[in-house]
Image (cartoon, grey):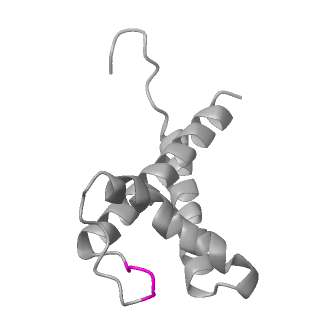
Amino acid sequence: MTVGQAPDSSVAKRSRWVLFAAFAGAHTAAALFTPVALAPAMAGSVYLPLLPLHAAGVPVLAAAAPGGWSSPSLLGWAVVLLAWLAIWWAGAHLLSQLFARR
């Protein structure tokens, strides 16, 4: 803890973990039980974090079949997972801090 920084309350920590689990669970459920209408959004949630890295030359996509899309490589799946973990954690942190101050 730095000078001038309020200590993180246990309620804020607990709510952060609950929100994080809710975000991760909702995204996982959406991936496992994707309705046809949400399929492009779910594909975008995988490919959008990878495309800038692929353009920079990082091997996040495996070799594509002729005329098809490239699937993420093992590194690509790790990047997708880490990107979404960071997004979920940031969202949970911001919401828990917002509601803890009220």
Residue at (71, 29) in percent of width and height = 102
Whether 55 is drawn above or below 69: the answer is above
| Position of residue 86 measured from the top left corner of the image (x, y, whole percent) | 42, 50
Image quadrant in which you'd find residue 96: top right
Whether 99 is drawn above or below 62: the answer is above
| Position of residue 100 measured from the top left corner of the image (x, y, whole percent) | 62, 34
Residue at (57, 38) in percent of width and height = 94
Residue 58 within the magenta-colored segment of the rendering: no
Q: In which quadrant will I find the N terminus?
A: top left
Foreground residue, 38 or 88? 38
Q: Would residue 9 be found to the left or right of residue 83 on screen?
A: right
| Position of residue 36 measured from the top left corner of the image (x, y, whole percent) | 72, 86
Q: Would residue 102 be found to the left or right of residue 16 on screen?
A: right
Residue at (38, 79) in percent of width and height = 70
Helix, strand or loop for the magenta stretch, by majority: loop
Image quadrant in which you'd find residue 34: bottom right
Segment colored magenta = 67-71
Foreground residue, 23 or 17? 23
Whether 39 is drawn above or below 50: the answer is below
Residue with the most extreme front position: 67
Foreground residue, 72 or 55? 55
| Position of residue 9 measured from the top left corner of the image (x, y, whole percent) | 49, 34
Q: Would residue 63 be found to the left or right of residue 27 on screen?
A: left
Residue at (47, 67) in percent of width and height = 47
Foreground residue, 44 or 93? 44
